[in-house]
Image (tube, grey):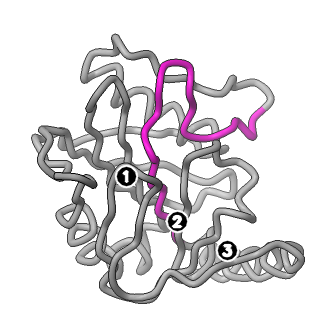
């Protein structure tokens, strides 16, 4: 519990430091992810993309309790050479996407992106088919640790369409925050609708 309290304190400090940047409401209902697709939010989120300096262009980041306690990444569609995040770890280069990645390599790309954010011991499991809107995709789970030893859990969904990779990735401390949000994350992943379909 001490680690969770430390994370809450850190999240509050981050939000104070980012006070000059814009955090935008993401209310219940339709949330548009660029021009490609939309999802349905079942609760009130905050769009913290502007304060997330480790995200890449075309990646949206939403949070309910602050980005150190939960964060939902939604990519508009990554092309060849694009990244999901910008590495915060000097020893780890920013992972980039290649259009010829196999499904296994694509899952590894997401795991490597989580590691590039500074998480340690990133492991994926429970790889299974999923539907990203009307496209075949993959779902999988992740576990990791922060540098302070806090256990983090994640859920991801990926799909390729038109030479682009679409990623939805949720990360939160395993204790309380991940389980609390899990039903909402499943609902969001199941709500994807590509525009014009």
> For this rendering, which residue is in front, 35 or 139?
35
The mark lying in front, picked from 2 and 3, is 2
Q: Please give the name of the residue rendered at 22% of the width and 67% of the height, measured from the top-left corner.
A: 186
Q: Please give the name of the residue rendered at 75% of the width and 40% of the height, measured from the top-left corner.
A: 88
Locate residue 35, reporting x and y percent.
42, 52
Whichever of labels 1 and 3 marks the residue nearer the N terminus, that label is: 3
The mark lying in front, picked from 1 and 2, is 1
Q: CA distance from mark 1 to mark 2?
A: 11 Å
The mark lying in front, picked from 1 and 3, is 1
Q: CA distance from mark 2 to mark 3?
A: 13 Å
Disc 3 designates what residue?
Answer: 7
- Secondary structure mostly seen in magenta is loop
Disc 1 designates what residue?
Answer: 168
Locate residue 71, reporting x and y percent.
52, 65
Element marked by disc 2: strand
Within 10 Å of disc 3 (Cα), the crowding (few <14, some 14-19, many 20+) is: some
| Magenta residues (range) | 70-89
Q: Please give the name of the residue rendered at 21% of the width and 46% of the height, measured from the top-left corner.
A: 139
**Magenta stretch: includes residue 173:** no
Locate residue 86, reporting x and y percent.
68, 38
Res 158 quadrant in image:
top left
Element marked by disc 3: helix
> For this rendering, which residue is in front, 100 or 161?
161
Whichever of labels 2 and 3 marks the residue nearer the N terminus, that label is: 3
Farthest residue toward the front? 196
Element marked by disc 1: strand
> Compared to 86, does 92 lie above or below?
above
> Compared to 19, does 121 lie above or below?
above
């Amino acid at each position: 519990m001490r680690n969770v309290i430390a994370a809450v304190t850190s999240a509050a400090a981050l939000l104070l430091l980012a006070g000059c940047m814009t955090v935008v409401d993401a209310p219940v209902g339709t949330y548009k992810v660029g021009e490609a697709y939309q999802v349905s939010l079942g609760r009130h989120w905050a769009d913290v993309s502007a304060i997330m300096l480790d995200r890449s262009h075309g990646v949206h980041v939403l949070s309910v309790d602050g980005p150190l306690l939960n964060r939902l990444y939604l990519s508009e569609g990554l092309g060849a050479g694009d990244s999901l995040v910008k590495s915060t770890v000097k020893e780890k280069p920013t992972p980039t996407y290649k259009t010829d990645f196999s499904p296994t390599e694509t899952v590894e790309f997401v795991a490597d992106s989580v590691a590039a954010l500074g998480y340690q011991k990133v492991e994926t499991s429970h790889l299974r088919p999923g539907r990203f809107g009307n496209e075949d995709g993959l779902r999988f789970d992740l576990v990791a640790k922060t540098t302070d030893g806090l256990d983090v859990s994640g859920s991801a969904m990926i799909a390729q369409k038109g030479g682009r990779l679409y990623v939805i990735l949720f990360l939160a401390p395993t204790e309380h925050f991940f389980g609390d949000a899990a039903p909402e994350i499943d609902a969001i992943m199941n709500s994807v609708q590509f525009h014009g379909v």
